[in-house]
């Protein structure tokens, strides 16, 4: 059920995290999210962090805004893991995966029932099988598709579901020497029960776009135009060039624009992330103008709001 991206051509959004504000000093540690929310200091910092993330995206002009993964920190232990996936209950790692899937499904359905218009779920393993082998030496790509689909069962009747793929981002570094390809597992990815699938097409290049366009024909395709591995800010014309290439293979009504992956918790500053989001919107606006599509308002690029601009 398309909600967040409905009625918008070439909508923009981000994948995953944004850099946590430096003043957000209280950590979750081993507390669950709900337990931490009882703590006045953590709750205040969390709510303020979400507000700054949302405002940064609004100023940049993004169409679909997220919480920037503000509910995570480096020491998070999700509440649902405490019982559902403990070794005391499930010795077998595959059984633990299925228990985790069931627990996550309950949490995600509660989120959808509360009115969330889009749920973005990371699926880091399906496309990794050719590069890293089968998880636990047993799970084939088809098994991982079944796990994903079990995790999101019932969601698409209530909300928009995104399946996020990622090639890794430890400390803003690649985990593979060579750039990997999605092509060996595109057919498997096409079987996931999602409305949209994300692909890294900035840091990994556009070489898979033709194959993606030929294989993913009944879902929206989210292309990354922002590289999460580098602090260099993309130029608007670079973003526009990548989008023109994507439009050769994917129709505009099924194309969504985003970052390759999350930009937080890996050394990127808030300012870098802000300018990258602005570049994404400005580059998309170039292509929107070429196609006669309404452009997004980007307050960050409006000279009326610049601290450096002079009064007339």
Image (cartoon, helix red, strand yellow):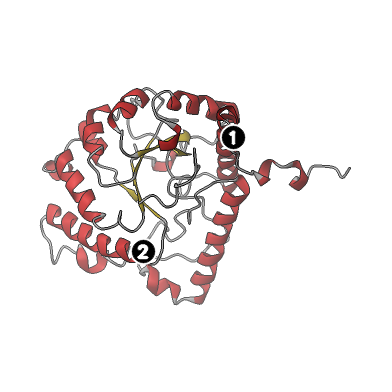
* Most foreground residue, 286 or 85: 286
Q: How crowded is mark 1: few (under 14 residues within 10 Å), some or many (20 or more)?
A: many
Look at the image and tell me whether residue 89 can be seen.
yes
For the residue pair 122 and 282, the one nearer the viewer reads as 282
**Quick one: quadrant of the C terminus?**
top right
For residue 244, above or below residue 270: above
Q: Which residue sits at x=13%, y=52%?
A: 94
* Dot 2 alpha-carbon crowd within 10 angstroms: few under 14, some 14 to 19, many 20 or more: some
273 vs 137, left or right, is right
Q: Nearer the viewer, residue 306 or 62?
A: 62
- Check disc 1 and report its element: helix, strand or loop: helix
Q: Residue 147, position in %: x, y?
A: 19, 50
Disc 2 and disc 1: Cα gap in Å? 32 Å
Question: Mark on residue 139?
Answer: none
- State the image coordinates of residue 276 (x, y, percent, origin top left): 56, 39
**Residue 191 place in picture, x, y as percent:** 22, 40
134 on left or right of 173: left
Write down the residue under mark 1.
Answer: 285
Measured from the top left, where is residue 7 in percent x and y?
48, 46
Image side of residue 232 versus residue 1, left or right: right
Element at label 2: helix
**CB-based contact (under 8 Å), mark 2 and mark 1:** no
Q: Disc 2 or 1, which lies upstream in sequence? A: 2
- Residue 180 in sight from this viewpoint: no
User: What is the count of numbered marks?
Assistant: 2
Residue occupied by mark 2: 111
Residue at x 41% of width, y 63% of height: 115
């Amino acid at each position: 059920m398309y909600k967040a991206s409905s009625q918008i051509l070439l909508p923009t959004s981000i994948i995953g995290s944004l850099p946590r504000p430096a003043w957000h000093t209280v950590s979750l540690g081993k507390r669950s999210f709900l337990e931490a929310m009882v703590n006045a200091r953590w709750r205040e910092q969390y709510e303020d962090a979400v507000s700054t993330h949302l405002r940064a995206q609004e100023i940049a002009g993004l169409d679909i805004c997220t919480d920037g993964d503000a509910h995570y920190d480096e020491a998070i232990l999700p509440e649902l893991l405490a019982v559902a996936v403990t070794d005391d209950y499930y010795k077998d790692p595959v059984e633990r995966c299925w228990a985790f899937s069931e627990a996550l499904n309950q949490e995600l359905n509660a989120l959808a029932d509360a009115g969330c218009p889009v749920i973005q779920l990371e699926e880091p393993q399906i496309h990794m099988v050719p590069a890293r082998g089968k998880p636990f030496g047993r799970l084939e790509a088809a098994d991982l598709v079944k796990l994903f689909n079990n995790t999101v069962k019932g969601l698409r009747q209530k909300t928009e579901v995104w399946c996020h793929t990622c090639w890794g981002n430890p400390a803003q570094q690649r985990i593979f020497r060579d750039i990997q390809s999605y092509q060996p597992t595109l057919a498997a990815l096409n079987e996931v029960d999602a409305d949209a699938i994300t692909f890294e097409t900035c840091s990994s290049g556009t070489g898979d776009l033709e194959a993606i366009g030929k294989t993913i024909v009944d879902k929206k395709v989210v292309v990354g135009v922002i590289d999460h591995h580098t602090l260099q800010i993309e130029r608007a014309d670079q973003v526009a060039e990548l989008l023109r290439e994507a439009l050769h293979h994917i129709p505009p009504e099924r194309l969504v624009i985003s970052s390759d992956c999350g930009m937080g918790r890996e050394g990127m500053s808030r300012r870098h992330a802000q300018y990258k989001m602005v570049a994404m919107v400005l580059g998309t606006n170039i292509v929107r103008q070429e196609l006669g599509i309404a452009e997004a308002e980007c307050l960050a690029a409006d000279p009326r709001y610049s601290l450096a601009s002079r009064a007339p």
